[in-house]
Amino acid sequence: MSRPQTVLEEGDRGDAPLVVPRQVLAEAAVWVARLHGPDRSARMERDCLAWQARSAAHRRALEKCTDTWQDVPRLTLGDAYARAVSPSGAARVSGRAWRRARWVLGAGLAVVCAAVGIGIQQWRELGRHVTDVGEQQLIVLDDGSRVSLNTASRVRVSLGSQQRLVTVEAGEALFEVARDRRRPFVVRAAGAEVVAVGTTFAVRLQGGRADVANSLSVTLVEGQVIVWHAEGTASGQDALPSPLALQAGQRLQLIHRAGIGGWTQTLDRPHIESLLAWKRSLASFVDVSLADAVAEMNRYSRTPIVLVDRERLASLRVSGEFKTADLMGFARAMANLHDLHLQEAGGRLELYAYPSTSGWRRVGACGAQVLEPPAEPRLVSCGALISPGGLVTKG
């Protein structure tokens, strides 16, 4: 006799049993895995809401699978299978948590066996975590360590019996490492390795600037780390000929300049709270150049701010905190602060200085003082500047 194709769950308040088809259960398990994976997006969330709207059974299935995911965070597919075939193994997870784990196990195995929208290769890729531009993500590893990813970041995680390895491929991450002296926590980036046991530190990898091929910064918040070149890489050895131990509050910066060759190394003590302001969805600046502040804010948006005539704006400085999700607000604040013109053009925000008024004379118009070029005296709209390049509205 074949197994039934439905699962009966009693209602939470003793109401009539709710019939949850096994196919719906399998689909719910897929949704939970996808929503907790590296490719989560707004479109995925909308599709999941539409899927839940199909019936109460769909909503109940997702609720149960989500509860299992949260209650048994370290339950992997392999562990679940071992507990299912071994009664002694099942005893390791008791009570309500195991009942939920066993309930969702059938869905997980069904997904693998029936390949319902997900393949074996995707299960192997669960160690890869990616954030989109403007997105942040918190990852809790099986050992209890926490990895916070900032905007446009990409890491790969591999937890082995001898060491815990995270490779930073792009972007920025904050690591809060669970203590385990038997397994060092190693972060690899740009040919360098950061080795820790139990500590908190940040790693940022940058590239793409015209004058910098790659730059790596390691900031130690608390504890102790050792930074050295990764085995089998030449670039890290150039920058770190010998291991370097950082003290709490220190930042190591390694910069490789294009066309010159070799690395430059600097060690300083930045303002940690400002450096980690992105954890609060803020960008914090203390007397930095406008160009550097713009470059930092542009990390969080696909609509960049462009400084027109950068040489004229090179002396401008910025201090303050700004919401990383509000690029337009930042651009307007800079325009007001430094008396700059702001305009949207070609999918970008342009900031530039008003034209010089040297040699102009004032005339009365519309009850206000208006500037006009002396060579071609003519009245213009109130509060406007007119130059050989055209009319630029001010204020």
Image (spheres, rainbow, N blue to C red):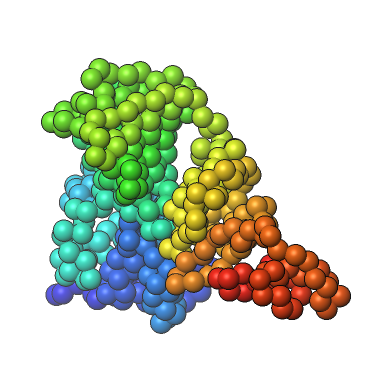
Quadrant for the C terminus, please.
bottom right
Q: Nearer the viewer, residue 279 or 324?
A: 324
Q: Nearer the viewer, residue 120 or 130?
A: 130
Report the residue at 58% width, 53% height from top.
323
Q: Nearer the viewer, residue 154 or 29?
A: 154
Q: Position of residue 90 (x, y in %)?
A: 27, 46
Report the residue at 33% width, 38% height from top.
215
Q: Position of residue 27 (x, y in %)?
A: 30, 71
Quarter-of-image position of residue 354 = bottom right
Which residue is farthest right? 367
Q: Position of residue 20 (x, y in %)?
A: 35, 74
Report the residue at 42% width, 39% height from top.
174
Which residue is farthest bottom? 54
Quadrant for the N terminus, please.
bottom left
Q: Is residue 366 left or right of residue 342?
A: right
Which residue is farthest front? 375
Residue 82 is at least partly visible in this image: yes
